[in-house]
Image: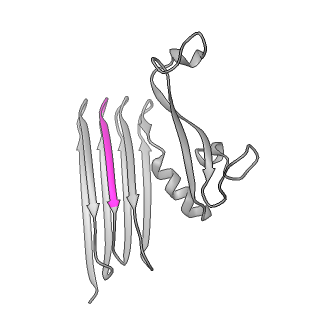
Amino acid sequence: NQALHTEAVEIFVNDGANLKFLSLQSWGQNVYNFAHKKAIVSKDSNLDFTFALFGSKFTKLNLDMILNGEGCSVRNYGVYFGIKDQDFHMHTNAVHKVPHTKYDILNKLLNYCQKYDVSLCLRFEQFGQGVQNFKINPHASLPLDLACFSCYLIDEHKYARTLDQHYFLNVCA
């Protein structure tokens, strides 16, 4: 027997609020799953949005993140495990309605890997105040943040070089 599941979620993160949201989906291989999740994030607020997909015959997931206030940020984390002929389609949209907003890159990596049929691992390192010694590294005066430094090609067991198609500046663009 085949089954259908549909889901719609709207999240509103008010000014100055912090929200951690987890969405867990674990359906049988007979389920067709269609989900749309939308978040509107306001001024100086933060949303950590984690979703995990562990099953279904077919999943179509749309994530819309509306960054609606200056100083707001969204971080998306995703975990996906498929077996046999499972089919996952995930699309993320980040709409920056005002300046000085921040959206994480983790879902962009998934979309990039699907588009080019490649398995990649990005290496990020923290930099800024308290991480490095200012006498050694001028970046030590910057606010605490993350930066991408390299892209490892998992199937080829090597790091991408400057002129490679999958060099980290191309992946993160």
Q: Quadrant of the C terminus?
A: top right
Query: For residue 1, what is the image quadrant?
Result: bottom left
Using the image, determine if residue 71 lies above or below residue 64. Answer: above
Extreme residue in the front direction? 157
Q: Position of residue 67 (x, y in %)?
A: 37, 40
Name the residue located 44 percent from the left edge and 29 percent from the top edge.
100
Q: Position of residue 26 (x, y in %)?
A: 28, 68
Query: For residue 95, what is the image quadrant?
Result: top left
Q: Assign the magenta stretch its main secondary structure.
A: strand
- The stretch of residues the image draws in magenta is 43-52
Extreme residue in the bottom direction? 1
Name the residue located 41 percent from the left edge and 39 percent from the top edge.
97
Q: Is residue 143 left or right of residue 162?
A: left
Query: For residue 3, what is the image quadrant?
Result: bottom left
Does the magenta portion include 159?
no
169 or 160: which is nearer to us?
160
Extreme residue in the top direction? 135
